[in-house]
Image (cartoon, rainbow, N blue to C red):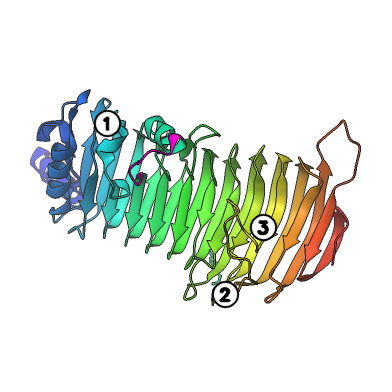
Amino acid sequence: MAKCISILSILFLSILCHFTPNIAANNVVHFGARGDGRTDSTLPFLRAWMSACSSARPATVYVPRRTFLMKTVTFSGPCRSRIRFQIDGTLVAPNNHRALGNSGFWILFHKVSRLTIYGGTVDARGAGFWACRKNGRNCPAGARSISLIWCNNVLVSGLKSVNSQTMHMAIGHCSNVKIQNVKIIAPSGSPNTDGIHVESSIGVSILDSMIRTGDDCISIGPGSMNLWISRIGCGPGHGISIGSLGNSYNEAGVQNVTVTNSIFTKTQNGVRVKSWARPSGGYARNLHFRNLIMRNVAYPIIIDQKYCPDNVCPRQGSGVKISQVTYRNIKGTSATQAAVKFECSSSNPCRGITLHDIKLTYSNRLFDRPTVAYCSNAMGTHRGSVFPKSCF
Ligand SMILES: *[C@@H]1O[C@H](CO)[C@@H](O)[C@H](O)[C@H]1NC(C)=O
């Protein structure tokens, strides 16, 4: 009987072992990373990555709860199996902003599939770079904190990114990416510190995240398709933007983007589509903005096809064709009277815009004035109750 039980338990254990993936943990400390916040850990991280990436079984790169100094680094794929990048600690960039060089990247994942980045804080210490930009001296190009390029099947969960030099997170040429529970924080005055930038990618979702920066919370560039953005707290910052589009003539379009269940607080824009005023074959269509709350937002609903941030811009009709855009259940306050503004292209008017259940009031209590909707070259319809009164 005893023999029988032990044979059974061995059988059980071997079945258990067989079905539990053998996740080898490559602890960066075992590869020589110091975790004192001062010693350059770039090479040990790369060695841990290469060990995980060459593993035939799912592997983990493990970063324990310490502070690691990282210079510019590229984690390259393709890898042999799934990788989990588990960060319990903090990665910091060197104090001298020039140390990140001119590549435009700080931490780059290149051609990696089946990747999970879990937890962690990344601090690019961008203040030195912003100050350099402000003084206009010959500054380096500036680095994005985390970039994912040519990637598939990626999950980023629980990451915190603070004070990037330029964008906090950039996703390009990827498919099937999920970003959830991230926190992105930079001062409201910091230049071009966009939260998450997506372009040339299909099937990206961004969920349950808090983004406070000096530029767009989320920016969506050409070639973005099937984006799902939900439960975002945005602000301060410039809001969620599609564009700038139409920068070049041969530009991929943007289609099927949904922004829902989100709150914008004291942002410059709420949901914005922007394009340069020049010829282009680009487009933006099937855009859905719904269940949004605006709190003291300067331009809650805006399409701007004469986008010109610094007064030296093209002044032609934008070639970017904007169509099938719905705004539904968007409520709250506008910090300007222009709560709804459609400044569309004279050569390619916006078509198929729907306003459905909108209530945006003027937040300035000193001037008791109504908000207004402004349309230029915009065609559409309204349903339900719409305030400010629709301009279609
Ligand atoms: C639009 O994108 C969503 C994901 O955001 C996807 O589920 C849906 O199938 C897409 N719709 C079309 C028509 O492609």
Disc 2 residue type?
A: Pro
Where residue 241 sits, quadrant-wise, is bottom right
Q: Residue at x 29, y 28 (%)?
A: 95
Discs 3, 2 touching: Cβ within 8 Å: no
Would residue 106 be seen by someone viewing this image from the given angle? Answer: yes
Distance from the alpha carbon under mark 3 to that under mark 2? 27 Å
Q: State which tag comes first along the sequence, 1 or 2.
A: 1
Kindly identify which residue carries mark 1.
94
Point out the image quarter for the C terminus: bottom right
Q: Residues within 10 Å of mark 2 (few under 14, many from 20)?
A: some
Name the residue nearer the viewer: 41 or 84.
41
Q: State which tag comes first along the sequence, 3 or 1.
A: 1
Any atom of ligand 1 within 8 Å of the CB at mark 3? no
Q: Which residues are magenta?
A: 135-143
Point out the image quarter for the N terminus: top left
Q: Is 214 placed left or right of 135 in the picture?
A: right
Please, what secondary structure does the residue beneath circle 3 have?
strand
The percent coordinates of residue 287 (x first, y second) are: 63, 65
Q: Is 80 placed left or right of 143 in the picture?
A: left
Please, what secondary structure does the residue beneath circle 1 have?
loop
Q: Residues within 10 Å of mark 3 (few under 14, many from 20)?
A: many
Q: Is 209 placed left or right of 363 in the picture?
A: left
Membership of 83 in magenta stretch: no
Task: In the rendered structure, find residue 279 and report the number of the disc placed on it.
Answer: 2
Disc 3 residue type?
A: Phe
